[in-house]
Image: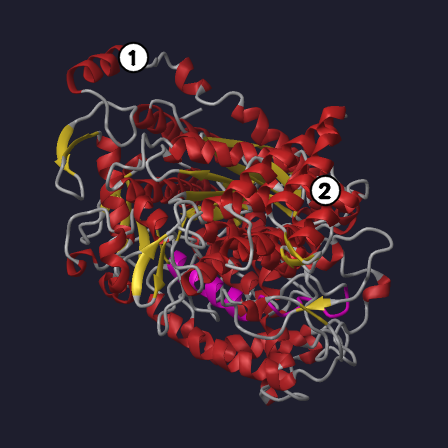
Amino acid sequence: MQNYTIETKLQLKIKVLGAMDLEKIKKAVIVASLFHDIGKFWQRAVHGNEGLSSSTLNLEGDLCPELGKYKHVLWTSEFFELFGNVFPINVSEQLTSDPLDNVKNLSARHHKPLTPLHYIIQQADWLSSGMDRTRAEDIKDEEVGAFRKKRLISIFSYVKEKGESKENWVYKLTSLEPTEDVFPVVERESYDLTDEYKNLWDRFIAEFKNSSVLSNNFNIWIGAVLGLLEKYTWCIPSSTRDLPDVSLYDHLKTTSAIALALVLYHHGKNTLNSTEAIKNREEKKFLFVIGDLSGIQDFIYSLSATNVKGASKILRARSFYLQAIGEAAVHYVLDKLGLAPVSVIMNAGGRFIVLAPNLEDVKYKLREIEIEIANWLFDEFNAKISLNITYDVEVSGSELMMGNFENVLGSIQISAERKKRKKFLEVLKSGQSFILDRLYDELRKNGHCKFCGENPAVETIPDETGKAVEICKQCKTFQALGKWLTEVDAISYTANNPSNTGRNIKLFGNVYLNLHKIKEINITGDYYYLELFKREEGFVYPVKFLANYVPVWRKEDEIIFDYVHEIEQTFKDALGRVKTFGELAELGVIYSENGKIEKEGKAMIGILKADVDNLGQIFSGKFAKNLSISKYVTLSRSFDFYFAGYLNHLLETKYRNIYVIYSGGDDLVLVGEWKEIIQVAEEVYGKFREFTTWNKNITLSAGIALIGPKYPINRGILMADEFLEKSKQNKDGAKSKDSLTIFNTTIRWEFLPKLWEWRNYFEKWLTSKESKVKTTFMHRLLKYQMMAREYYENRDPNGLRFTYLLKYDVARNLMERKNGKIVKGREEMEKLFELVENNLKEEYKKLWLTLNIPIFYVLYKYRGKKLKGGD
């Protein structure tokens, strides 16, 4: 194969199609398909024919398949007429020799197409929905009657089993912000929503108009508009006739992705002028490009110890850096293949999926990209991490239809797993090998990096305390990146030349990662892509929610600073600095008593690792019968929004001493003071269940590891991972998983409140002068619990001794009698005897098996504290 680009080959084919300008057609199809149903939004925001000019009303016979049917296309046409100057292209410009081929007509004629380009949009619309809208039973107005009363139903409420409640969980008509306002609620009544739609529409239009300032960069404009559409149409049902569980946003985006792939495919096959070829759904026109990042855990967590000052910044930076590699790779692929941001079907959790045309030219280019990125990762990270790019899932239009898309997802998963087993194969075939000799020599000469403990040091730098430490090239980069992340609002990717921010990192293929404060962004800059970390008032740049919260020293922390800080500096100098893990641990042991700061308990760090249970099954089974590409996108996007968007907001507003190592896709890793991390785990679980409509098929499992502040953080995370796996293996109850493992003990989430009842009793008794319970008794109780476990789990009859030993202990040490009456210890006796006397009941058996959890909790919490004057 000759070495020339896709663009060159495509341009050669333009001659066959007359005076077509491929670049113009691509942009026109992207815009037309992305806004083809914008009329639904506008129509629901008005009464009758409000907003339509007389000239547009006169087009009803031309645009609607039947009078009164699919009238939303009239508002789509009016939208382009009224706001045409906002777009980065001329929406009225003729694109081919047919005068009906312009953006406005491509978009508004998708229900009554006349030209091949019109049919591109129509077919994309149908394939996105996964259904053929020409079916006889569907030839009726989708919006007759109560279409302004119907809300978007949460897609999570339909992943249900037979016999479950079928009540509708719906979304309020509100802009997408990472707060509980966007959680689904049970639908109680329906009423006319026109005013709510109007409020949303007016806000959308105001921001959409402002997007014109980005029109010099088409991809960034598209990214910004995608952000606006997500913000305002995420809660709008794309159809009120069919099951309304797919948002207008997801439908518009996937329609645009399919339309772009179709136009490039047919252009590449010289069939862009053939309506019959465009309507053919048996031809494998689509190619799914999958990028899967592996080695994530080993890379992120390779820190030698937490007591190296500055390690916390590096840990955060490693996580962000891997996300940036995936993001850069996505936009690199889009750029090289001539695609656009709409082509990204999914990008979360270390994996991306891009929809491309199934052309040999595309595969050839992807092979070049794959080898280029693989070589860079091999050289830069000694093959520790890899981006496994596959492009062998070829799909026809029929396979995108509802009921068939499950098989496509299965093929994607198989392709990704197969590639993971062959990572760096092409690099190794080329004759490259590991440069062990050089690494060995450098390690002998310079020693290990004190941060990662793996790579050879390249220089000596002062840590945050001023102490000289050896650091490797990678960790030095990550140290700078960790600092930058506390200062910036946005990132961009540029080719060949970095931005002038001074915060730049070179990646593969001469691609640079740049970090910006919002005022530094140049709207005329030559960016591949640009995105904000969160929405900023008055700015319409693209936004990608990112869970990147870390605790820093704030003004309100001054009162406690002297009692917990590890680094010798003034509070003024510490303001804005990321708190060290040791400082987070110490925050948990200080308390105020009589105006004086005291310390109690054991200073420890908690590490929470959690992910969604049975994710593959959620995308398969009964739900798969109704699965379409747009529903898949809705489901994936919703999971990522919870972990990357809402969770970050929760920490920022409520748990400000919790450190996000990673959260996105369907999993998370958080670090914080151990008691607070337990509290966070419970709330993350509870909010996740609420977010997913308390659907019993969608649950979360977690593991919490507790470590000392100087214990190696990477080992602590591995412990949390092991505990998470124990939770995944829990078979307690009607189903497995849906569990938490803590103190090396696994418990179903639903049983945790019962354990906390006992924790409250233990705390009350330990701290009350009226009780004779001391920590020495709690240690004995722990021994009885271990005996009970031996009896229940191993049927060891010696374990049964816990019953009479505990009763004897309580009677002798916790109770005080006078004149034959109990004057102290009655509550302790009644509650603890209750445990013994009901030990054969299932609930109490569970209590005995897990009672070590509240016991350990109070022992750690009150360790070292003088209780009741002597314990």
Callout 2 secondary element: helix
Residue 739 visible in the picture: no
Answer above or below: position of 160 versus 216: above
Q: Amino acid at mark 1?
A: Leu
Question: Which residue is at the front of the view, 345 or 349?
Answer: 349
Give residue 690's position: percent from left, percent from top: 64, 61
Give the residue type at disc 2: Lys
Q: Position of residue 717 (x, y in %)?
A: 45, 36
Would you say residue 276 sits in the magenta stretch?
no
Report the mark closest to the observer, 1 or 2: 2
Q: Pinpoint residue 864: horizontal percent, then vertical percent.
A: 39, 45
Sequence-wise, the earlier of marks 1 and 2 is 1
The residue under label 1 is 436
Instruction: Please report the residue visible at 27 percent of the width from the left and 60 percent of the height from the top.
Output: 560
The residue pinned by badge 2 equals: 846
Q: Out of 497 and 502, give the one closest to the viewer.
A: 502
